[in-house]
Amino acid sequence: MENFSQTAAFIWSVADLLRGDFKQSQYGRVILPFTLLRRLECVLEPDKAAVLAAHEKVKAMGLPEEAAEKLILRETSQNFFNTSPMSLDKLGETGIKDNLENYVQCFSQDAREIFEYFKFDEFVGLLSDANLLYKVVQKFANTDLSPEAISNHEMGLVFEELIRRFAESSNETAGEHFTPRDIVRLTTSLVFMEDDDALTKDGIIRTIYDPTAGTGGFLSSGMEYVHELNANAVMRAFGQELNPESYAICKADMLIKGQDVSRIKLGNTLSNDQLYSDKFDYMLSNPPFGVDWKKVEGEIKDEHALKGFDGRFGPGLPRVSDGSLLFLMHLISKLRDAQEGGGRIGIILNGSPLFTGSAGSGESEIRRYVLEADLLEAIIALPTDMFYNTGIATYVWVLSNKKPTERKGKVQLINASNLSSKMRKSLGSKRNYLTDEDIRAITRDFGAFDEASAVDPTNQQPLTKIFATHEFGYRRITIERPLRLSVQFSDENIEKLRFAPKPFNSAMQWIWNAYGADWTDSNYGDLGSFEDEIRAEIKVSYTELKEKQIKDLLDSKLWLFQKGLMDKAYELQGALSAAMGSNVIINKPCDDFNFYDAELKQALKATGIKLDAKEKKQLLDAVSWKNSEAEPVIKKVLKETAQPKYGAFETTVNAKPAVVEYQPDGDLRDNENVPLDPSQPTCSLIESYFDREVAPHVPDAWIDANKRDDKDGEIGIVGYEIPFNRHFYVYQPPRSLEEIDADLDKVSAEIMNLLHEVHS
C-alpha cells in the first residue's frame, strides 16, 4: 500500500461487509477497535514469546494485577502487552465470539480499557448475530499493520483518516467530539509557527495538551506539525475527555502513535482536573459552544471562592449558561512558567466571549485579566458554516505568556471570515472549508504582524488590524440627573390612597365600585358575603394575583389600613390649607418639592400624625409626579465646596447660599463608557469626556463618584470588550433612487411581456 490514504481506504472497505446489517453511523464503532486490535498485536509480535513466558511465572506468584503488570512490562519494549497465545488469525470460526472476547481481556489494563469504552463486546455480539464476525476478523487478520510495513507516524495518519471518515459518516453528532481537519490545521499552525526555529533543534522535548480532547485531533495535529519540522523531536501528549467513546478513540490513537496513554484521562475537566499539577508547552482546544455548566456549578464556585488566583478561576466566573471562558481560564492556568520557556494556547470560541457581559461582570473581568496580563496575541475570525454541528461565527484565540517584543502590549485581529471555499457536499452544518492556500494566507498574515500585509479581496479592506491592549478597555461611569417633582394635595390625589399599590390596585378599584357603596365605618372592608363572586372575577380578570394576595385582598385589614392612610392625608390637607391657604399645593400644583417637604414636616408636627416609611412612600406617590420643568429635589445640604461634575451644586436654601446634593432620578440614570487611556489620570480622562459628551446635552447631570472600580479604586468600573465586527465594519451606502427605479422598470417590463405572451 503506497500511502496512508490508500491504507485507510482499504481498512474502511470493511464497511462493504457491514452495509445492510449496521447503520452507516455504526461503521466506525466496528472498524476503529478492530484496527487498533490488529495494530496492537502486530506491534507486540516480536516480544510475544517473552511476555507469555513471563506471564506464566508471574501467574504462579499470585500477585495483584498492578504488580503483575509491572513485572510483565519488563519483558516488552512497549507500554502494554497481551498474555493470550491467540491472535486474530488463530481464533477459528467455531466459538470465535468467546475466543475474541477472551483475547481482548488478556490485554494490560490501559489497552483493555479502550475496548471497554468502545463497547467492543456489544459490537462483537452484533457481528456474531449477523454472521459477520468471522469475515471481519479474517479481513483484519490479513491486513499487515506491522511497524515494518507502516511506521507509528504513518499508522497515526491512517487512524486519523479512519476517525475522520467515522465522524463524517455520523455528521449529526460529529461536531460534539470532532473538530474539522482544516480548522485543526489552522489553529495548530498559529500556535506552533512562532516556535519553528526552536523546534528544529536536536534533543527537543515538548508537551501538548487538550482539555477537551474529543477523538484526539488536536493532539495528533500538533505532533504531526512538529514531526514534519523535526522527526527526532519528542512530543508528549496529554488530554482529558468527557465522552467515553471519544476518550476510547483518542486513547487508541495515542497508543498507536506510541504515546504513554496513562496521560489521557476520562472525566469532566472543569470539575475534576486529573492533570491538576501539570504545566504545558502547547495547548489546543475546541470546547463546546454555549454549553451551560450548571451540573458542576458547585465545584467551580467553590474553587473560585476558596482558592481565588491560586486556583483556575481567580479572575471571575462567566454566566452559567456558557462555560467557554472557564476552559480559557483553565488553559491559562496550565501555561508553563515564562521563566521555564512559557507556553502557547490556541482555543476556538464563538462570538459570545468577545463582548458578553458589561463592566464588572464575570466575563468582562476575565477579558480584563487576559488583556492586562498581556496574554492575548491574536484573534482570527473564521468563516461561518465551518463546523459539523453549528453554522455560527467562530474565532480562534491565540494566547502566550512569552510574547515577542514587537507583540508586547498589542493584540492582532485578523478577519478571515471571507476566506473559504464551498464544499461540494455539506457535512451537517459544515458547508465551507479552508483550502491549504487559505490557511497559508492566514498564517502569513499572523506572522507578518503588519496591517499592510494583506487585504480582503471582497472589499479591499485590511485583513489585519493591530490594537494596544488598553484600546479594548473602558471605564463605565454612572451619570445621574436630579429628580424633579410637582406636588398637589388635591382630593382627587388623596382618594388614590383608598387603594393599595400594585398588584392590588386594579382589583381593589373594581371591588370598591361593585361592593363599597354601602360600607360604613362599622363594616368597612367586610367582603365575607361576596367572597365566591370576587374569587370568580379574580380568576377571570386578575390572574396575576396569587392565593396569598387574594386572601389579603379579601381581608378587611388591608382596606382599613388604606382608609386610615387616606384619613391621615385629609387631616394633613386641612393643616396645610390652614397654614398656606388652599391655592398653594391643594388647588393647584406646586413645582418646588423642597417647599412642599418643609411644609409637610410642619403639618405633621402640628397634627401629631405619625407616618411610617411605607405610608410616606404611598402618600408621596399619590400626591406627586415627575415633571422635567419642576425644581430639583434636594437630598441633603453638604458642608463642602461645590463640585457640580460630582453632584455638589450651589443653590439657595431658606434664602441662604448653600451647597447641596440632589436626589437622583433612577429613570434618568445612565452609563457612559469612557475609553481607557493610560497616558492620562483617571479624573482628567472622565472629566474631559463628561465636558465633551454629556454636559452639553444635559447640563444638570453629574458623575456618581461612589461607583468605583474594585481593583484600582478609581471612579468608574473598568470593563473590557472586543467588538471584532465593529472594527472591520465597512459601510455600504444604500442604492440610489435612480438605480432602484431602473430595476423596477426592468421588472415591470418583464412582467408586461409575460402577460402579453399569455394573452397572445
Image: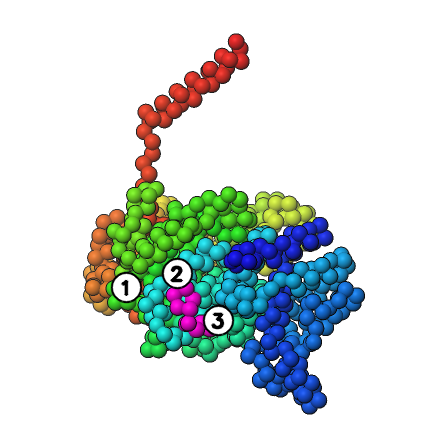
Q: Position of residue 644 (x, y in %)?
A: 23, 59
Residue type, numbered disc 3: Ala
* x 23%, y 49%: residue: 696
Q: In which quadrant of the rendered image does the N terminus lie? A: bottom right
Dot in front, 3 or 1? 3
Count the marks: how many?
A: 3
Mark 2, residues whose alpha carbon is within 10 Å: few (<14), some, or many (≥20)? many
Q: Is residue 758 above or below residue 611?
A: above
Q: Position of residue 690 (x, y in %)?
A: 24, 56
Q: Position of residue 394 (x, y in %)?
A: 44, 54
Counting residues from the N terminus, which is met first, the one under dot 3 or under dot 1? 3
Residue type, numbered disc 1: Arg
* x 28%, y 67%: residue: 404
Q: Identify the image quadrant of residue 336.
A: bottom left
Mark 3, residues whose alpha carbon is within 10 Å: few (<14), some, or many (≥20)? many
Q: Secondary structure at mark 2?
A: helix
Q: Answer left or right for 264 relative to 441.
A: right
In the image, farthest residue toward the right: 94
Separation of disc 2 and disc 1 at Cα?
A: 18 Å
Q: Is residue 232 magenta?
A: yes
The region drawn magenta spans: 227-239
Q: Answer left or right for 732 relative to 394.
A: left
Residue type, numbered disc 2: Ser
Residue tagged by mark 3? Answer: 237
Q: Is residue 744 magenta?
A: no
Q: Identify the image quadrant of residue 730.
A: top left
- Tell me the tag on residue 189: 2
Mark 2–mark 1 contact, CB under 8 Å? no
Residue tagged by mark 1? Answer: 407
Counting residues from the N terminus, which is met first, the one under dot 3 or under dot 2? 2
Separation of disc 3 and disc 2 at Cα?
A: 17 Å
